Image (cartoon, rainbow, N blue to C red):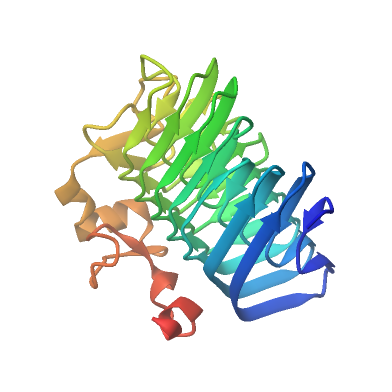
Amino acid sequence: NSGSSATLFNSIGVNGVFKNTVINVTLSTSNGTVVNFASITYENNGTINNCLIQNLSVESSSASINFAGFVFDNKGTVQRAMFNANIEVTNIDNASAIVNTNSGSVIQCGNNGNITIKGSNATRLAGIVISNSGTVNECYNRGTLNLSSNVNAVYVGGIVAQNTSTASVTNSYNNGSVTIVGAHTRLALGGIVGESYTNSVNNCYSTAIIESTAISDNQSKGAIIGRLNAVISGRNNYYLNGSTYGVGNNTTTELAMSVDSNTMKHQDFVTMLNVNAFEIDEDNKNGGYPILKWENAEELLANILG
């Protein structure tokens, strides 16, 4: 693609609906253009529901790519979008499995893919949303997220890379490792959110391995939030003990508490989180840790196709 964007649609209107679709796609670029990629649409003002990316290939010899699995700019609703592809690409600046920029609602979406981005401009990586000023609810990441670059400032989050002051992340979990490699003067690395300008991160848990070779201390990496630029307050978040602090730049336990693995796999922990959103992992699809109730929905494409 030689243009500035590579999408199926340029825009989906307020009344538009795109649903029940399995996506296999190849993106190939060969020039120096910055390409904004999303498999469905650049801008969504409507509803995208029950879609699955099974296979995705990205080939970039020189272009700089901003990559989003389904939607680049979401102002509407993205629900039950699931990303099951593994990708490792050089020349990607920013990448997320579901949405690049969200000012709407991203609900009940999941990433199962391992995503590695490399290159001189690799800056932000997330399991669900890169830049969030809207609502992210009942989402998960089980994929491995790796960013390798020497950009001065980098942001990686299991669910969201960066939250603005109007954003919220609720009832979500991360069970994948989150890693940054390179020399950086500023970084925010979080199991749920990389950097957040709001403390509205609620009822979330993370078992993630948080790793970085870029710094010698833990002040910019957190099991829940890497860097919080807002007032600390109690938000019912949990992380696996033995990890770094819940919030990378604050050692308080008020926003997030550490618990052991056995506790996390018990019904009492599901009740502590939110029994209306989570349930016990009876089929061991998440290593015994709680899953979201919608994950077992019969109509979910991922469940129909196995």
As drawn, 77 above or below 168? below
Q: Name the residue at 53% across, 29% down.
A: 149
| Residue extending farthest left | 262
Relative image position of residue 129 (x, y in whole percent): 59, 49
Give me the residue at 44% from left, 83% from top.
Answer: 305
Q: Quadrant of residue 15?
A: bottom right
The image quadrant of residue 192 is top left
User: Up-down: is 152 above or below 79?
Assistant: above
Residue 1 place in picture, x, y as percent = 78, 58
Q: Is residue 142 left or right of residue 49?
A: left
**In x, y percent, where is residue 267?**
22, 60
Q: Quadrant of the C terminus?
A: bottom left
| Left or right of 137 in this view: 266 | left
In depth, the one of 249 and 22 nearer the eye is 22
Q: Please determine whether, in this image, residue 8 is positioned above or below residue 200.
A: below
How many tags in the picture?
Answer: 0
Whether residue 234 is visible here, answered yes or no, is no
Camera sees residue 174: yes
* Left or right relative to 103: residue 156: left
Taking the spot 49% from the left edge, 84% from the top edge, the residue there is 299
